[in-house]
Image (cartoon, grey):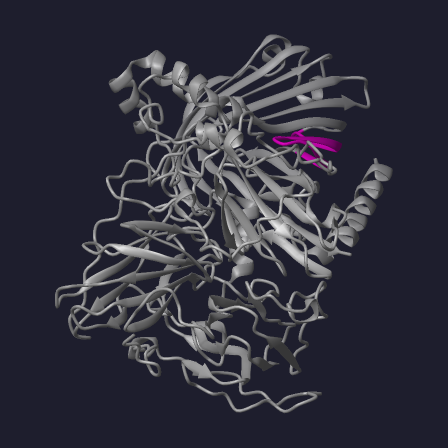
Amino acid sequence: MKKLLNITLITLALSSFTYASMGDDPLFAKLTIDELEYQDNDEKNTAWDTNLWIGYDLNKLYFYSEGEKPKDGTTQSENQLVYNRAIAPYWDIQFGVGYDKTENDSQTWGVVALQGLAPYFFETRGALLIGDSGNIGLRLEAEYEALLTQKLILTPSISTDLYSKDNVSMGLGKGLSNITAGARLRYEIRREFAPYVGVEWSKNFGNTADISPLDEGYAVAGVRVWF
Amino acid sequence: MLRKESNINRRTFVKGVALSSLFATLPLGAKEPKPTIDKSHDLHGTAFSLVIGKTAVNLTGTPAIATTVNGQISGPTLHFREGDTVTIKVYNDLEVDSSIHWHGLILPPAMDGVPGISFEGIKPKETFTYTITLRQSGTFWYHSHSGFQEQSGVYGAIVIHPKEKEPFEFDRDYVVSLSDWSDEKPESIYRKLKMMPDYYNFKQRTVGDFFSEVKENGLVNAFNSRKMWNKMAMSDRDLSDVTGYTYTYLMNGNNPATQFKALFRAGEKIRLRFINSSAMTFFDVRIPNLKMTIVAADGNNVEPVTVDEFRIGVAETYDVIVEPQNNEAYAIFAQSLDRSGYALGSLTTNAQNLASAPTMDALPILSHADMGMNMGGMKMDNGKMDDGKMDIKSDKKMAKNMPMKKKIPITPLPEARGVQTTMRAMDPQYRLSDPGVGLRDNGRKVLTYADLKSLDGVVDTTYPDREIILRLTGNMERYMWSINGIKYADAKPLQFHYGERLRITYINDTMMNHPMHLHGMWSDLETGENQLVRKHTVIVQPGSKISMQVTVDAKGEWAYHCHLLYHMGGMFRKVIVS
C-alpha cells in the first residue's frame, strides 16, 4: 500500500511539473465537509462525512473520512486515501487504501472505486474493498440535489454496503449489510456555507443485523462547508 | 462634416469613483526610471507613456485594489493617426510580469505583446517600448495578456483616426467601453470555477420550474423535454460562467449608479464606439427609443445597418451612429447575456439629467439548437416546449450558397475525445441570422452576423486554398476548455502557410458562446453568399458552426484563442506562419 501511495505522490509531482507553467491547470486543493451533524438517535451521534482533495484536473489525491461518535461511546470511522484519475468526461477511477475503525477492532482495505455524475444528475460513488482477510466489500452511494430555490437545496441520498464474509469484531455480516437513506434540506448562506436539517433512516440486514441490530429513523441537523 | 475634432471624447469621471495611486514603490533594478503618470483620459500624438500599476478603487462601495494603466479604469484612450509610426513605452510597476496586447492591430509579431509568443513579457519595474506603424483606422482596444490582469483593470480604448474621410458623418464621438469588475481577485474567481463550475449561477433550473412545465404540458411531455439534458447531465441555464453575483458591470469605468454620461444636443449625430473589454461578459446593447446604425465592426467599416439592439461578444467592437431628436436622457443599456446585471450610461443633453435603466429581459433558456441538435428532429421531440416554439434561424441554404466554386481541401488536425469534452454538436448549423439565445423573437430588430458586410474593397476575396476545422470543446463539469479536445499545454502549434488563403470553420461543441480571436491577421467572416465582413474576433454560438477566411500575410508566431479570460488557458493555440 505504501508503494501505491508513493506512485500516487510521484504522479502528482510529475503532473505538476508538466502543467504548472501553462496556467490553465494549477494545483488546487478543496476540503468539503459534506455533513457535520448531530443525529437525534438513541446513540445521540455526532457524525461527519468529509473529503479533501489536492491535485489537478486529471490527477488528484483524495482523502475520505466518514464516521460517528456516540455521546457515550467510542468513535467509529471509515477512511480512504486514494489516487483519483479522470477517465471520462464525468467519471473518475480511484485506487488506494481504506482504514475502518470500530470500538473493538480496525480493518485495512485495498480500494478500487468509481465516482462521477450519472445521467439525470445523480452524484454516485461505488467502492470495491478488498480486505486482508479475503473479505470483499462493496459500498455504493448516490445523491441528488434538488433546487427548491437557488439557495434552498434538498439532497436525498442513499447508500448501501455489502460484504462477502462475516467480520464480527468489525460488526459486519455477509451479504447485504446496511442501507441508509436520508434527505437533507440545506440553505446556502454562501455557496461554501450551508446549515441544514434532515431525516435519515438506517437499517442493518442479514448477518450484520444479527451481529449488531439496527433499524432506526431520526432527525439530523448540521452544517455543510467547503473551501 | 461638423465634427468637433478635439476634446470630443471627454469623459465625465465621477467623484465616487476616484482613483488614486498606491504603492509608489522605488524602482528596483529598473532599466529606466518610472515615468511620471499622465492622468489624461485621452492621449494623442506619436509618443506615449503608459504605466501598469496597482491602484486603489471603489467601484462597488467596497474598496479594492485594481491593476490599471495610468491609474485609470478604463485605461486612457490612445488616439493614433493612420499612417503614423507610434512608440509606446510601457512601464510595469507591478510585482509580477505584465504586457500590453494591441487588440486587432496589424503589426510585427514582436510588437503583439503576448508573453511566451511575441516576447518575454515586461518584467517588474522594467519598460518595454512598442513601435507600431498604423496601417488601419477605426476602433480597437488594448489589454494585458498576462495572467488575469485584464479582469482587474488593465485595458483601454484605441481610436485610430483615418487618413481619408469616413463614409459616414457624426458631430460627436464617444468611446463606450463595457467591462466586468469584481472586488474578488481573479485568481479566486478561477479557483471557484474549478471547485464548482456553477458557483456564480443563481438562475438555475429549480423543482418549481419542472412542476410549472408539468402543469402546462403534462408529466410525460415535461419529462421528455428534460430527457436530453438529464441524460447528458447538462443545464439549459448555463449561460455565463461568471455573473452579476460577483460582477459590477462598468461603462467607461462607471457603475450603473454613477453612470457614464455622453452629452449631445438634439439633432446631432453621435458616434458611439462600443468596445467589449470584459473578461467574461457578453452584453446585449440597446438605447430605448433610439435606432442605432452600425457603421463599423471590429474597427472595419461595414454597409450601414440600422438596428434596435446588438449583442457584443468579449473583445468585439461596434461603431454606431445615433441621432436623438429630443432633449431628453436616453439610457445606453447593456445587459449581460445571462441577465444578472447591466452596464448603464446616459446619452443626455444635461449631465444632471440621467436616464433610468429599462427592465432587464427574461432569463434566456438554451435550446436544443444551442446543443447542436438538428431542428427538425427537435420539433418531433417536443412540439410546443421551450425552444420548439422559437423560430431559430439556421442557415440551411448557407452551406449550399457559400461561394464554393470548387471543393476546398481540408487539412485534418489532431483531435481527441475524452475527459476534455462533454458534448459533441451532432448536427451543427450555420446560424448567421440567429441573433442568439435570449434575443430571438424579442420584438426588436437585433443585429445578426448575416447583416454585416464589409464595404467593397475592404476584404480579400481570394478563393481559399485549404480549410481547417476547429472544434471548440470543453468539460463544464470540470471547468476544462480545449480546441479539438486538446488543451493548449498538450497541443502542437497550428501551421499556417505564408501567402495562403485559409478557410477556418469552427464547430462549437459546448453550450457557451466563444469569442475566437486570431492575432496578427484579419478574420474575414463569411456572413452570406459572396458576403464577408472583416473582423478580429468571431463569436461562435453554442452548438453552431461558422466559417472565416484568413489571408496569411504575417510571418511569425501568433496567439489564437477564446477571449473569455477563464477559458483562454486551455482554448488556445500558437499559430506559426512560415
- Of residues B303 and B516, which is closer to you in this image? B303
Lateral position of residue A151 relative to residue B163, left or right: left
Q: Quadrant of residue B50?
A: bottom right
Residue A174, can we see it? yes
Stretch of the chain drawn in magenta: A79-103
Query: How many numbered markers are drawn?
Result: 0
User: Would you place residue B109 above or below residue B410 in this image?
Assistant: below
User: Would you place residue A200 above or below residue B127 in this image?
Assistant: above
Q: Is residue B33 magenta?
A: no
Q: In x, y percent, where is residue B233?
A: 51, 28
Lateral position of residue B481 relative to residue B55, left or right: right
Residue A227, can we see it? no
- Of residues B227 and B202, which is closer to you in this image? B227
Q: Extreme left residue here?
A: B327
User: Would you place residue B42 above or below residue A223 in this image?
Assistant: below
Q: Residue at x 64, y 9 (%)?
A: A207
Q: Is residue A93 magenta?
A: yes
Main secondary-structure element of the magenta-colored stretch: strand
Q: In x, y percent, where is residue B255?
A: 32, 66
Q: Quadrant of residue A178?
A: top right
- Of residues B258 and A138, which is closer to you in this image? B258
Q: In x, y percent, where is residue B110?
A: 70, 70
Q: Quadrant of the N terminus of chain B?
A: bottom left
Q: In x, y percent, where is residue B344?
A: 28, 61
Q: Quadrant of the C terminus of chain B?
A: bottom right
